[in-house]
Amino acid sequence: MSVDAIGLSANLLKAVKACGYKNLTPIQQQAIPMIRSGVDLLASAQTGTGKTAAFSLPILDALATISLKNTSADNGGQNIQALVLTPTRELAAQVAKNMTDYSQFLPLKIGVVYGGGKMASQTNLLKQGLDVLVATPGRLLEHLNLRNVNLSQVKFLVLDEADRMLDMGFLADIEKLTLAVKQKHQTLMFSATYSNKVKSLANQLLSTPKVLGVAKQNSTSGKIKQSVYWVSESRKRELLSELIGVNNWQQVLVFAGTKESANILAKELKLDGIKAALCHGDKTQGARNKALSDFSEGKVRVLVATDVAARGLDIEDLAYVVNFHLPFLAEDYVHRVGRTGRAGKSGMAISLVSPKDERFLDNIEALIGRQFERIIVPGYELNQDEALEHQQSSEKRASKNRYRANQEKNQVITKKKQASSSSNKKYNAKIKKKR
């Protein structure tokens, strides 16, 4: 469906086209009419499918159309009409940038606050007055407690990547912030997954919501080619450098398991002659922004990140994602590889897997419903001890799986016997009554 077909106001449509939009994605086609109707919404879609535009466009259109602009210069942020909560600084900055681009020809002010930014400059921003505020929960709660911001006039509340916010422990902050929204408002929850925690929060915050899911849960885009390289833990870095060098990969996002391992990997890549930057929680916001900027502009070849960057990074035409370490949670694999293959484009996701990672790989395969071929690059075969350890581990898992299968089979047989016995008792009781 063309962007012309949904009836956006002239200046909003002009901005959307200036951003390069021609056609709507499935989540946008379905969510925008629902949001315009005024209902609360719980929506799920694969990462990279255009969720930001799906909620931003109808909200911005509504704010511009009904002229909600408050031009008071010092109102303590009282004219905030739309609030978007996100789990990470990177995602907050990305959403704010997108909304600013969409509203470039509209008389609307968009602002963003997040942890790591200077409180004084954020306070000044809030007191100047905003129409739309994008924020991380923790920092916004600080401003609320300091009375730097007034959320009582919010008419649109968006929880973006709600599952991630809950995983990061923001539930109490979200509850406090929503209590500060005094007037009747429309609440929109966008989440990559429908976990029990997400459903519970939806029941708490949403009023008779519409539920929208445009893709199979925990699935990855068909545009992403996914591969698993089987390699010794001690030789992962060597293999990664060879893959990047031999194949001449120019823009590679690499996920490490911890901040410490990310630091070590970046240093080793630099020793191999591969320019690398770092993005993780110990880096200042300025350092993280510079790393992302250098990576996006091609000044560095590799960005080594932890899961703080698994959601919120929107790097145009990112071709390669590498899991140097597999994530502890299988769901995070989906979010990591979703940094490539965005908006219908193709991409490549590679996982470097050693024997100690295999239990995580099993969980990922079970989650996304596919089995990966273990690719072994000549010269990187496991040594004898590792091969033996892997064989013993595989046999142990196979034995455990057989035990579970037999257990489940016996449970099914027992249930059938119980059902049959119950049916016979009822039949005999009817016969006795007739006699």
Image: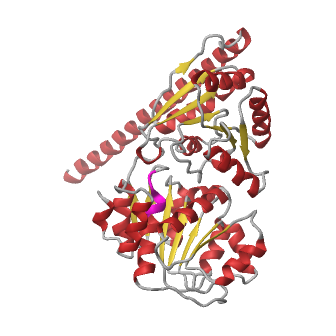
Q: Which of the pair 93/190 is nearer the observer?
A: 93
**Image quadrant in which you'd find residue 318:** top right
Does residue 208 sit above or below 330 in this rendering?
below
**Image quadrant in which you'd find residue 7:** bottom left
Q: Quadrant of the N terminus?
A: bottom left
* Dominant SS in magenta: helix
**Residue 352 at what x, y percent from top left?**
63, 27
Q: Residue at x 70, y 48 (%)?
A: 291
- Answer with left or right where residue 157 lies relative to residue 423: right
Q: Residue at x 74, y 65 (%)?
A: 117
Q: Residue at x 38, y 36 (%)?
A: 417
**Residue 262 at what x, y percent from top left?**
75, 38
**Residue 125 at what x, y percent from top left?**
68, 77
Magenta run includes residue 50: yes
Q: Which of the pair 297/31 is nearer the observer?
A: 297
Does residue 83 sit above or below 347 in this rendering?
below
Residue 207 appears in the figure:
no
Residue at the extreme top = 384
- Answer with left or right where residue 270 lies relative to residue 98: right
Q: Which of the pair 402/435 is nearer the observer?
A: 402
Q: Residue at x 72, y 84 (%)?
A: 147
Residue 380 appears in the figure:
yes
Q: For the magenta stretch, what is the residue range?
A: 49-54
**Residue 408 at what x, y percent from top left?**
48, 33
Residue at the extreme left = 434
Magenta run includes residue 126: no
